[in-house]
Amino acid sequence: MSSELNPLARRPVEQRPVRVVSAHRSMRQRLRAIWDSRELLTYLVTADIKIKYKGTALGVMWSMVAPALSIGVYFLVFQVILKNGVPDYVVMLWAGMLVWTFFSAVVVNGTGIVVQRAGIVKKVAFPREILALSTVGTALVYFFLQLIVLGVLMGVMGHAPAWGDVWLLPLAFLGLLLLASALGIVLSAVNVYFRDMQHLVEVGIFLWFWLTPVVYSFQRTVAPMLGAKDLTWIYFLNPITPVVLTFQRVLYGQTMVTATTPDHAMLNVLPNWSALHYAVLNGVLIAASGVALIVAIRIFGRLQGNFAEEL
Amino acid sequence: MASVVEVQNVDKHFRLHKQRHKSLKDRVLHPGQGSFTDLHVLQDVSFNVGAGETVGVLGRNGSGKSTLLKCICGVLQPTSGQILVRGELAGLLELGAGFQPELSGRDNIYLSASMLGLSRRKVDGLIDEIVEFSELEKFIDSPVKFFSSGMYVRLGFAVAVTANPDVLVVDEVLAVGDERFQAKCMDRIRQFQADGRTILLVSHNADQVRALCDRAVVLEKGRLVADAPAGEAVRVFREHLLGGATVSKETNQIDGGVVIESMRGSNGSFMAQTGQRFEFEVTISSKLPVEGSFMMELYSQAGKLVVRTDPTQTPVSLSPGTQTLSVAIEDLPLMDGSYQVNLGIVSAEGNSVIAWREQIAALEVSYVGRGAGLVALRLNVH
C-alpha cells in the first residue's frame, strides 16, 4: 500500500490544495476544478449510457434506431418518392445527420440536465459545468458509434470518401463540439430560472434543422437562390452549415455526380470549394465557438451560485 | 497553526419567490416586478477551524446553520465573502445523495466517491473496506433501488467516512441505521478525531456537541453570536433558546460559580406515577449569593420538548456554599414513558442562564389507567 493510500498519513496543512468557495472565482480556478473532475465526468457518461439501455436486448444499438429511422424516412421521401436523383443519397444524408444528431442531443439534453439532476445539485458539491459536459460526452459516444456504422455502410456500398480531405473532419468536429458545449452550458443554467427554455429549445431545434442543409442539398436549392443576390453569407450565419457541408464534402466525396434519374443529368450537389476554403470556414467557426464557450462558462458561473436555492 | 477552514465575512441572501419559477411570459410582460422578498440568511459570519479540531455549529431551526454548512461544502455560494478549505472535504449533507438507483451498489460507490473527489485508483484500494463497513457484502452488486432506506444511508456513510477526507462535515446525519450501526458511526467519528482530522458537526443537540466538540460556534438569525469552547457555547445557545435576544456581557459576573451538582428522587429513584406527586432534591453549590430562578425542562424519548417551566414562578436565593432545593411536581400530568430532565438556574427575568445541567436524570413515569398519549388530562364530567 502506497503512502498515499495510508489513511493515517495526513499531508501537512500547508501543503494541501486550497479550495475557495466564493461568488467571485476566477476563470482559471473554475477551469481547473472542471479539469480535476474529469473522472467524475466519465462516470456520469458511463452511468448515463448504462442506465438508458440497462436490461434491453439490443443495448446501446438502440441509440442507432432513431437516427436510422429518420434517415430511412428522408431517403424514402426524397430519393424514392421525389426522385432527387442523387446517387448514394443515404451517405449524404447520414453524413449530415451525424452532425445534426450530435448537436441537437447536446443542446436539447443539455438544457434540461441541471433541473433533471436537481437532487445532486442541491446536496453534493462538484463543478456544475460537468453536468452539461456529461451530455456532450454521452452524445460523443453515440456520434462515434454512428460514424462507425456509416463507415461499415460505405464499405458495403463501395462508396469512397475524399481521403485527401479527411483531415477536415476533426477540424469541423472541433468547431461543432465547442459550439454545442457552449450552448449546452448556457441553456442548462438558464433553464433553472426560466423553465420555458426547455420547450423553446425543442421548438427552436426543429426549425434550426430545416435551416441546415441535411436532407436537402445546399448547392442545388439554397445557393442558386441566395447566390443570385449575393446573400449566400446569410445562410452561413447558421454555424452548423459549414460543419454539415464539410462532413458531406469529405464523406460523400464528390461535388458533381451523374443523376440516377433516366435523363442522367449532371448534378452539382456540393459547393466546388477548395479544401482551404473549408478549412477557413471551420477555422472561423472554431474561433467564434471558442469565444462562445468562454462566455458560456462565465454566464454559467454567474448563474450557478443560486442553483441550489432555485431548484 | 494554519486553519483548515477559513470562513471570511460570509453573507448569504436568499430570494424568497412569492411565485416560484416565473415563466418567460411573466418576465417579459412584467419586467422588474419584484415578486420576492430578500432574506438575509447569513450576516458577516467569520471563523476559523484549525487542523485536528472538532467544531460544532449550534443554532436553532432557521438560524442559518445548514446554509453555512452548504456554503462550506460548496453546494451554495456565499453572496459575498469567501470560504477557504485546505485539503479534501467530504460533506455528509445527505447520505447517498449522489446515488443512481439503477446502478449497482459497487458502481454507486465509484460514482459518489468520485463526487467526493476520489480517483478510481484510490477507490480500487478502498472498496473492500467500504463494503465491509456498510455490511452490504451480499447486496453490493444489486441495483441500489432495491436497497432499504437503512441500507442506502449505510452505504452513503461508508463511502463518506472511508473517503479519507481532511475535513468531514456532518449535518445531523449521525442518526443512521439501527443502534449498533450508530455506535459504529460514532466510533468512526472518534477515530477521525484520533487521527487528527478536522470535523465540523452541525447539530441542534447541544449534548452531542458538548460530548464530541472542542469548540462550537453559535448562530442566531444568521449572525455568529458565540465562538467559544463547547461548554461555554452551549450555555450561550441555551440562553438564545430561552429567548433572551441579547447576550448580556454581565452574565459572567452574575454567574457567581453556580454549579448544579446532582438531582435525587426523594424515594431514592426516578420512578413516578401519573397523577401522583413527585418530589426530588437538587444539590447546588455557589460561590456568591445569587438571586435567580429555578427552571426545569422535560424532553420525551423522541427528543421533543414536553415542557419548560416558567422561571418567574419559581424564584430561588442561593447562598455561598452547597445547598439543597426541594422540588415537588404536583399531580404529575404525564403519561407513561421515559423523560429526560434538564435543570437550570436562570436570572430572575429568565433570559440568561446562570447554571445548566442537561440530562441530569431520566424520569420514568408509569401509568396504570387505560388512557393514552402524552399528557394526563383530568376531566370533570357532570
Image: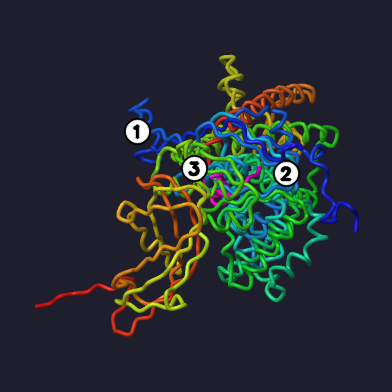
Range covered by the magenta-colored residues: A113-126
Circle 3 chain: B
For disc 1, the marked residue is: B35
Please, what is the three-letter code of the amino acid marked with disc 3?
A: Gly
Q: Which residue is rendered at x = 69% and y = 68% of the image?
A: B134
Q: What separation in Å lies between label 1 and label 2 (alpha carbons)? A: 37 Å
Earlier residue among tags 3 and 1: 1
Where residue A157 sits: x, y (%)? 77, 50
Q: Is residue B351 visible?
A: yes
Which secondary structure is most common in the magenta stretch?
helix
Circle 2 SS class: loop
Circle 3 SS class: loop
Residue placed most toward the observer, B148 or A98: B148
Residue placed most toward the observer, A290 or B201: B201
Q: What separation in Å lies between label 3 and label 1 (alpha carbons)? A: 23 Å
For disc 2, the marked residue is: A37
Where residue B186 sits: x, y (%)? 65, 63
In-image side of A141 versus B250 (left or right): right
- Vertical arrangement, residue B43 with respect to residue B145, above or below: above
Where residue B22 sits: x, y (%)? 39, 37
For disc 3, the marked residue is: B64
Circle 1 chain: B
> Is residue A121 inside the magenta stretch?
yes
**Count of all numbered marks drawn on residues in the image:** 3
Give the label, 3 or 1, closer to the camera. 3
Label 3–label 1 contact, CB within 8 A: no
Q: Is residue A68 visible?
A: no
Q: Which residue is rendered at x = 39% and y = 45% of the image?
A: B351
Please, what is the three-letter code of the amino acid marked with disc 2?
A: Ser
